[in-house]
Image: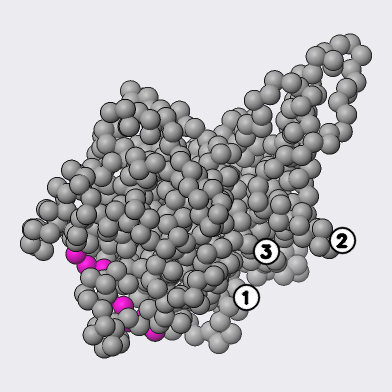
């Protein structure tokens, strides 16, 4: 009993690794990490056998590069969240500087060892890369991402793990359980590779046609079966069950369905990227591919999504009772996967049907197909935002899975297009849905920097739409011609959609990466024809169409409720010291902002941070007692103190020194 109390009060211990001390978690904290990881990172933890992982992590039997990667990913899961059960609300604790610095230590150590490792054919090497990529997906550090992407791609190609079940030698060399482990490691990598293709616009490491790897099987046995060397009562109980019961008594094979979702998502992303940049356009071939993907989505929905709806009430009850225990993973892992299946379904439909709305000169798209696509993606966006909100109501940000949540960005873009439009027969409150979505991003931003960027990116797209709509009023005489593409009488403007599937991480030709927003170009009407329309209509069309001002909705991104974005700078109550710290942080982030392309994720993040600390500086000045007088004047001096905010800042400063 005394040992447990001591471990709770001291969640970290010191351990020497290669001569240097690195804080390590206690066994109790390590146990919480391992038991909860499959909930927050379902695809990353695809290869996990929990009894084996717990024993080997506890006794340091893994290579250090793998050991520290697991600590990196699991550390944030243990952040304390106080729950108000009656209101189902979270008093969220932001990730502290101590957590961030600790994770940086683990990450740096793991990457350092990966670079030195010779045996890159070891599946643990590839799995480590995937684990670190998952951690990186919550942060803003493209340098680390590129390193890990390169290491993992080389490991996949050299080991030829993507053709594991083609090789007779592999089947002779490895036992079936070792083969299953390698299969799961590959599919874990594959999932991140295809999601990177969607988010970053990168090319796939391995084409689907070259993959010969069986899908995962025997999920329950794999997760809890095998040898159990720990005398842990829960582990031993479920290990015995997994080893003893027959295959037909196991739970449904959910991991196989997860890979099927990733395979289909990847195919749709590739189709959407290529559809409107193909030089030799063949409408018959194009329609054939589209119909095939629609059939696949419908099959996915009927066989995977509809029969497996997530129970948010069960997730809530189990989490409140068994947080960070093995029982929590056993009870709700399948529910988390069901939620992912549903969210991925909505994302795939939005991405696919938005390709119907791209206007390319010389290529005809029937207006009825455009109207149908608008209705479909509007319905999917509403469902997706509601799902995210409901999910975050029952699990706090430190447990929010990292696969489906970022996919909801496409729904935010749909809401931008729906501002001021109320489709007939349905009550879609686009401003409300968009506010719900951005509020969820702000909450998740307490644990993952990436989500802080999403509202800023949506604001950028909102500016594009907001600039185009006043310009389109010059062509109000042809608003009537937009009716055949409209879902409502006020739907007279072209919708903003991506030409190449992804909205994010577009670092050049930003505006050209989106569909046409000018009405005259959308309708392919030249200026002489517009003049003729103007004479005939006497410019009277605008009065017959209810057009809402887009500016009315800008407050969704510019509200003053910045609590979710606020970052504590110091507990020091000295106002001068506070000003110095905030000023230096503002200067640092402003310098970093200049280092990255204007449309990169780093640019959005550093702009956000610079704005935050700029506001804090103004607040410091206004609240300084010396300035609370009739004769106002700024009484602070330029600070000269130093403050370490991130390794990324240090790297940029090192680059500056080298340039000098």
Of circles 2 and 1, which is in front?
2
Toward the viewer: 591 or 500?
Answer: 591
Q: Can residue 585 be seen in the rendering of this structure? A: yes
Image quadrant in which the C terminus is located: bottom right
Image quadrant in which the N terminus is located: top left
Q: Which quadrant of the view contains residue 175?
A: bottom left
Instruction: Write down the residue under mark 3.
Output: 507
Q: Main secondary structure of the magenta part?
A: loop
Q: Position of residue 112 (x, y in %)?
A: 56, 63
- Tell me whether the residue at label 2 lies in contact with that at label 1, contact meaning CB atoms closer than 8 angstroms: no
Toward the viewer: 361 or 440?
Answer: 440
Q: Position of residue 564 (x, y in %)?
A: 56, 34
Q: Is residue 467 magenta?
A: no
Q: Which quadrant of the view contains residue 70?
A: bottom left
C-alpha span from label 2 to label 3 = 27 Å
Q: Position of residue 83 (x, y in %)?
A: 38, 28
Q: Position of residue 156 (x, y in %)?
A: 44, 77
Instruction: Write down the residue under mark 2.
Output: 660
Q: Is residue 613 left or right of residue 338?
A: right
User: Residue at 42% of width from left, 77% of height from top?
Assistant: 121
- Which is nearer the N-term, disc 2 or disc 3? 3
Looking at the image, residue 151 lies above or below residue 160? above
Q: Is residue 242 left or right of residue 634?
A: left
C-alpha span from label 2 to label 1 = 49 Å
Dot 1, how many residues are within 10 Å of its Cα: few (below 14), some (14-19), or many (20+)? few
User: Residue at 55% of width from left, 54% of height from top?
Assistant: 19
Residue found at the very far front of the displayed protein: 19
Looking at the image, residue 15 lies above or below residue 44? above
Looking at the image, residue 89 lies above or below residue 175? above
**What are the residue bounds of the magenta stretch?**
208-220
Instruction: Write down the residue under mark 1.
Output: 361
Q: Can residue 376 be seen in the rendering of this structure? A: no
């Amino acid at each position: 009993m005394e040992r447990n109390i001591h471990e709770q009060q001291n969640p970290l211990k010191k351990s020497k690794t290669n001569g240097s001390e690195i804080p390590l978690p206690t066994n109790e904290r390590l146990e919480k990490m391992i038991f909860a990881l499959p909930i927050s990172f379902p695809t990353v933890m695809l290869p996990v056998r929990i009894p084996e992982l717990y024993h080997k992590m506890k006794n340091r039997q893994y290579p250090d590069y793998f050991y520290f990667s697991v600590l990196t990913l699991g550390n944030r899961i243990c952040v304390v969240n106080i729950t108000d059960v009656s209101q189902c609300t979270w008093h969220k604790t932001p990730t502290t500087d101590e957590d961030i610095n600790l994770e940086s230590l683990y990450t740096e150590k793991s990457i350092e060892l990966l670079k030195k490792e010779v045996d890159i054919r070891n599946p643990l090497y590839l799995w480590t890369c995937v684990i670190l990529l998952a951690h990186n997906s919550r942060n803003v550090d493209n340098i680390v991402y590129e390193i890990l992407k390169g290491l993992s791609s080389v490991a996949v190609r050299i080991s030829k793990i993507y053709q594991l079940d083609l090789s007779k030698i592999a089947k002779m060399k490895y036992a079936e359980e070792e083969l299953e482990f390698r299969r799961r490691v590959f599919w874990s990598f594959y999932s991140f590779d295809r999601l990177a293709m969607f988010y970053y616009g990168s090319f796939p490491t391995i084409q689907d046609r070259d993959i010969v790897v069986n899908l995962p099987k025997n999920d329950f046995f794999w997760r809890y079966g095998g040898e159990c060397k720990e005398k842990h009562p829960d582990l031993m109980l479920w290990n015995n069950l997994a080893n003893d019961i027959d295959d037909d008594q196991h739970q449904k094979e959910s991991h196989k369905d997860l890979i099927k979702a990733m395979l289909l998502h990847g195919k749709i992303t590739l189709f959407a990227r290529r559809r409107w940049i193909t030089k030799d356009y063949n409408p018959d071939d194009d329609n054939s591919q589209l119909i095939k993907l629609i059939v696949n989505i419908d099959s996915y929905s009927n066989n995977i999504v509809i029969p497996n709806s997530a129970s948010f009430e069960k997730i809530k009850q189990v989490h409140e009772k068994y947080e960070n225990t093995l029982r929590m993973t056993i009870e709700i892992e399948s529910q988390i996967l069901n939620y992912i299946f549903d969210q991925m379904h909505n994302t795939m439909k939005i991405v696919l049907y938005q390709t119907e709305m791209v206007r390319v000169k010389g290529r005809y798209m029937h207006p009825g197909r455009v109207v149908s696509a608008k209705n479909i993606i509007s319905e999917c966006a509403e469902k997706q935002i509601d799902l995210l909100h409901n999910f975050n109501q029952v699990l706090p940000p430190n447990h929010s899975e990292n696969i489906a949540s970022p996919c909801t960005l496409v729904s935010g873009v749909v809401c931008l297009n729906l501002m001021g439009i109320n489709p007939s027969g349905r009550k879609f409150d686009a401003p409300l849905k968009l506010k719900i979505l951005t509020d969820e991003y702000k909450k998740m931003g307490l644990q993952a920097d990436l989500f802080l960027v999403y509202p800023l990116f949506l604001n950028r797209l909102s500016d594009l739409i907001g600039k185009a709509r006043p310009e389109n009023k010059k062509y109000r005489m042809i608003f009537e011609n937009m009716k055949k593409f409209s879902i409502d009488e006020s739907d007279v403007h072209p919708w903003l959609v991506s030409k190449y599937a992804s909205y994010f991480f577009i670092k050049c030709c930003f505006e050209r990466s989106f569909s046409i927003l000018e009405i005259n170009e959308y309708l392919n009407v030249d200026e002489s024809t517009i003049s003729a329309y103007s004479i005939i209509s006497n410019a009277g069309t605008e009065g017959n169409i209810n057009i809402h001002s887009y500016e009315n909705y800008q407050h969704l991104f510019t509200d003053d409720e910045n609590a979710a974005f606020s970052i504590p700078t110091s507990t020091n109550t000295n106002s001068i010291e506070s000003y110095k710290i905030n000023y230096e942080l503002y200067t640092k982030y402003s310098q970093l902002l200049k280092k990255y392309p204007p449309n990169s994720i780093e640019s959005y993040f550093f702009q956000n941070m610079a704005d935050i600390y700029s506001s804090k500086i103004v607040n410091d000045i206004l609240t300084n007692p010396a300035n609370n007088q009739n004769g106002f004047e700024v009484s602070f001096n330029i600070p000269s103190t130093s403050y370490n905010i991130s390794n990324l800042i240090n790297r940029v400063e090192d680059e500056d020194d080298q340039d000098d």
